[in-house]
Every structure is written in structure tokens, then in C-alpha cells.
Image (cartoon, helix red, strand yellow):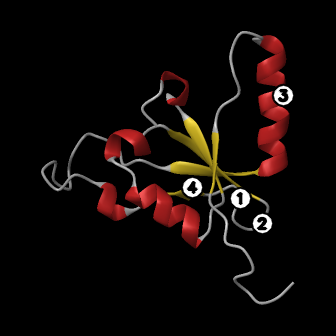
């Protein structure tokens, strides 16, 4: 996350493991997360935030807005990323961290 190419990144997943990963990031690195992608349309169109992210030294009435990460359907992101890459060839794709559980709901 310290590399220049990781000025911003995306988290693949909006479930338990992805949220745990985002929660474990430092506030500086958490601010680099531009979106969380998911295949479950029921999770998409919302935002993820955690009340524990607020700095207690700022107090409840702080002018600093709470961080909120949008949850986006994976194909919506793919289409927008394709357009971004076509219009600006010199920019690399936004890195994606994959945070998904394997076979947590049983065999398959």
C-alpha cells in the first residue's frame, strides 16, 4: 500500500472478510479505498462505513465527514474502468484487493 501505484485501490467483496480487511487498515490507507465491489446486487448501491472509524478526539460535532465507501456491482465498475482506460491510456488500472471467503456456506 506504500507504493505510488496504490494511491487508491478497490476491495473486491462487501461481506464479512472484506469489511474486516477495511477495518484493519490504518486511517490513511482506508482513505485510499475508492469502492468495494460485489456480485450480490442486494449489497450494491449502498455504502459501507463504521462508527469506530471516527476519531474520538474530533468529537461528535466534528466538521470532518465520516468516511463512507460505496459498494458497486462488479460489472458496473468494469464498464467504467474500461471507459477510463480508453480515455486516458497513460493511467494504469486501479489495483484490486480480493477479500472473499471460499466455501464458507458448505461444499460446492
> Element under label 4?
strand
Report if residue 49 is visible in the image.
Answer: no
Instruction: Work out whether residue 38 can be spotted.
Output: yes
N-terminal label among 4 and 3: 4
Q: CA distance from mark 4 to mark 1?
A: 8 Å
Mark 1 lies on residue: 44
Q: Residue at x 85, y 47 (%)?
A: 75
Callouts 4 and 1 close, C-beta under 8 Å: no
Q: Residues within 10 Å of mark 3 (few under 14, many from 20)?
A: few
Q: Which of the two residues, 99 or 30, is positioned nearer the viewer here? A: 99
- Quickly name the residue at label 4: 47
Q: Quadrant of residue 95?
A: top right
Real-space Cα separation, disc 2 to disc 4, in angstroms: 14 Å
Residue that numbered label 3 is attached to? 82
The Cα atoms of the two marked residues, 3 and 2, are separated by 21 Å
Where 41 falls versus 105 (above or below)?
above
Tell me the distance, in whole angstroms, between the alpha carbons under discs 3 and 1: 20 Å
Check if mark 1's residue and mark 2's residue have beta carbons within 8 Å. Answer: yes
SS class, disc 2: loop
Closer mark to the observer between disc 2 and disc 4 = 2
Give left or right: position of 23 versus 27: right
Nearer the camera: disc 4 or disc 3: 3
Residue 18 in percent (x, y) is at 57, 62
Using the numbered discs, state the Cα–Cα distance from disc 1 to disc 2 in whole angstroms: 7 Å
Q: Classify 17 as above or below 105.
A: above
Which residue bears the numbered disc 2? 40
Amino acid at each position: 500500500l506504500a507504493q505510488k501505484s496504490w494511491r487508491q485501490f478497490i476491495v473486491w467483496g462487501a461481506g464479512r472478510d472484506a469489511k474486516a480487511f477495511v477495518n484493519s487498515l490504518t486511517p490513511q490507507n482506508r482513505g485510499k479505498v475508492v469502492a468495494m465491489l460485489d456480485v450480490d446486487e442486494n449489497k450494491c448501491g449502498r455504502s459501507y462505513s463504521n462508527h469506530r472509524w471516527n476519531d474520538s478526539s474530533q468529537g461528535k460535532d466534528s466538521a470532518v465527514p465520516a468516511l463512507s465507501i460505496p459498494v458497486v456491482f462488479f460489472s458496473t465498475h468494469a464498464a467504467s474502468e474500461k471507459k477510463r482506460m480508453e480515455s486516458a491510456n497513460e493511467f494504469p488500472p486501479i489495483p484490486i484487493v480480493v477479500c472473499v471467503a471460499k466455501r464458507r456456506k458448505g461444499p460446492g
